[in-house]
DNA sequence: CGAGCCCTTGAAACTCGTCAATGATCGTGG
DNA sequence: CCACGATCATTGACGAGTTTCAAGGGCTCG
């Protein structure tokens, strides 16, 4: 039974058995973290890289006025803060949204992973895709209306969660409406109204923590969603690179 | 006389003489590119990594509705598309804004640079800072009003251009108002009005291509600017890392 | 049963976008 | 040398999208 990390990284490079064994070894001391708990805080430097195995976490930052922007969702299989290996301090915070299972990985272990060419390539790809996602979010918030923005987020999560086997035509979305509002940069009041529009048009339903997408094609078209930025299914590209 | 690349990377790691020599060797065949010319296009895969030596370029993307979002400014010393070494295709485009001097660097030469530990560390840092900038832009567009957003961009460019010796209390800003509008996600009409407010409050002046910032402290405070995300002056952090 | 959190709704105010028109500047060709 | 077109900056008026304030209802959990 492969863990989500293996599942995800295999999308970027052909991992050999030993690569997979090493990855599975990293996922030993799993820790359960309650919802709404910080894994890393702006200004600090963590001794560990955090990996999410279950649940939703996020990258976020508060403005001087006290408004929160969520800058990334961290779903099972995602490294939260690979950059702490190199940078002196965090420039943003990372916190859980739902209860999570996470692994704290010491720097040396990360460096060991990077010694293996295929793993290194896969992790680099994953990091580059994270950047690509971030760019798309900027486009989303900068150029699209609230309806489109919301739909876009739903589409992206669907594809990302499918990669790790956590979605079919819907998925568990353990967010509050306020979380979503802070993601797409609207007030929670407005988010609520937009959400109801999507529901009434029979595009989605969202009860409890379960999101169902009824017409993904229409939702994608409506929100201007193009999946190319996720670089899905292009096996690591240049394997000669590293 | 050091080139801008050396100047920038020295901010991230102590480069030895040989490192600098290698970098200077990379900056050989400088090419002059007119304004408004694409260096790389969404969907393609370039054989070269592009480095800006003079002028302004940008990362951008069009939405399905034909709106443009600028996702990054590429100023002298910036690599445009290091990721093409690894990923199969571009998920966004890169184009010049003003006339530029750029270098086309073949993949092998990039890989050669990465063989040198200090250079590798410095380039990694630069890439991580690029991501940090991107995150801050998302916060900017998602959470701040147009005044703040505009001020924030002006502040950031001031600090970034100072690193490569191209700014004191102002700098050459060869952008159209439309470019700026596409950066902060407003209409050009609205941008124009906000710009005039900043001028009337004696915060800035901008004639021709020269931007002067009259009161950087007040501008930073007004726009909620905190420079920590630029990671300036923290010499590469963990030099043991790589 | 009460406290707290989240979702929902309404009304009023405001930021910002769109449309449209007028100037200003600049390079090009007649 | 001037006329022309093109690009960019500016302005006004109007409307749409969004925020804010305020209040009420439902749910969970101790």
Image: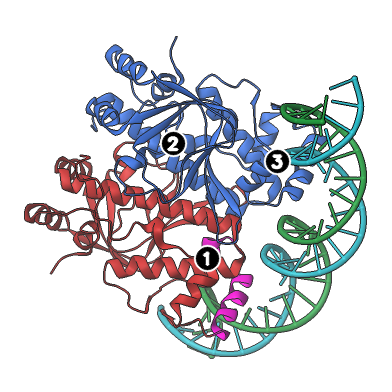
Chain colours: A red, B blue, C green, D cyan
Q: Which residue is mark 2?
A: B80
Q: Residues within 10 Å of mark 3 (few under 14, many from 20)?
A: some
In the figure, is residue A187 to the left or right of A231?
right
Q: Residues within 10 Å of mark 2 (few under 14, many from 20)?
A: many
Residue that appears at 41% across and 24% down: B11
Residue D8: % across, % down: 73, 38
Q: Which residue is mark 3?
A: B177
Q: Residues within 10 Å of mark 1 (few under 14, many from 20)?
A: some
Q: Nearer the viewer, residue B121 or A129?
A: A129
Q: CA distance from mark 1 to mark 3?
A: 26 Å
Q: Quadrant of residue A26?
A: bottom left
Residue that appears at 40% across and 39% down: B81
Q: Residues at marks 2 and 3, common chain?
A: yes
Task: Tell me, yes or no, whether the highlighted magenta stretch contains residue B11.
Answer: no
**Which residues fall within the magenta stretch?**
A181-201
What secondary structure is the stretch in magenta mostly built from? helix
Q: CA distance from mark 1 to mark 2?
A: 26 Å
Q: Secondary structure at mark 3?
A: helix
Residue that appears at 43% across and 43% down: B131
Disc 1 chain ID: A
Q: CA distance from mark 2 to mark 3?
A: 23 Å
In the figure, is residue B148 to the left or right of B101?
right
| First-in-chain label (2 vs 3) | 2
Residue A66 visible in the displayed image: no
Residue A116: % across, % down: 14, 43
Residue that appears at 76% across and 44% down: B192
Residue B171 visible in the displayed image: yes
Disc 3 chain ID: B
Residue A199: % across, % down: 54, 83
Q: Which residue is mark 1?
A: A224
Task: Tell me, yes or no, whether the highlighted magenta stretch contains residue A191.
Answer: yes
In contact (CB < 8 Å): disc 1 and disc 3: no
């Amino acid at each position: 039974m492969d863990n989500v990390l293996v599942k995800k990284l295999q999308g970027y490079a052909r991992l050999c058995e030993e690569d997979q064994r090493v990855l599975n070894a990293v996922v030993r001391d799993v820790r359960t973290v309650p919802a709404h708990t910080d894994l890393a805080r702006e200004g600090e430097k963590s001794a560990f890289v955090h990996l999410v195995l279950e649940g939703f976490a996020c990258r976020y930052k508060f403005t001087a006025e006290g408004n929160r922007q969520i800058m990334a969702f961290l779903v099972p299989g995602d490294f939260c803060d690979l950059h702490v290996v190199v940078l002196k301090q965090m420039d943003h915070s990372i916190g859980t949204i739902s209860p999570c299972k996470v692994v704290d990985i010491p720097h040396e272990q990360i460096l060991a992973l990077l010694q293996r060419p295929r793993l290194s390539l896969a992790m680099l790809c994953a990091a580059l895709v994270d950047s690509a996602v971030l760019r798309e979010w900027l486009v989303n918030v900068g150029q699209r209306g609230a309806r489109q923005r919301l739909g876009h987020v739903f589409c992206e999560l669907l594809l990302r969660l499918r990669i790790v086997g956590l979605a079919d035509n819907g998925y568990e979305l353990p967010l509050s409406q306020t979380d979503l509002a802070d993601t797409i940069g609207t007030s929670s009041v407005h988010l609520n109204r937009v959400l109801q529009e999507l529901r009434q048009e029979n595009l989605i339903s969202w009860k409890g923590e379960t999101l169902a997408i009824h017409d993904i094609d229409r939702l994608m078209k409506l929100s201007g969603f193009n999946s190319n930025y996720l670089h899905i299914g292009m096996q690591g590209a240049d394997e000669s690179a590293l």
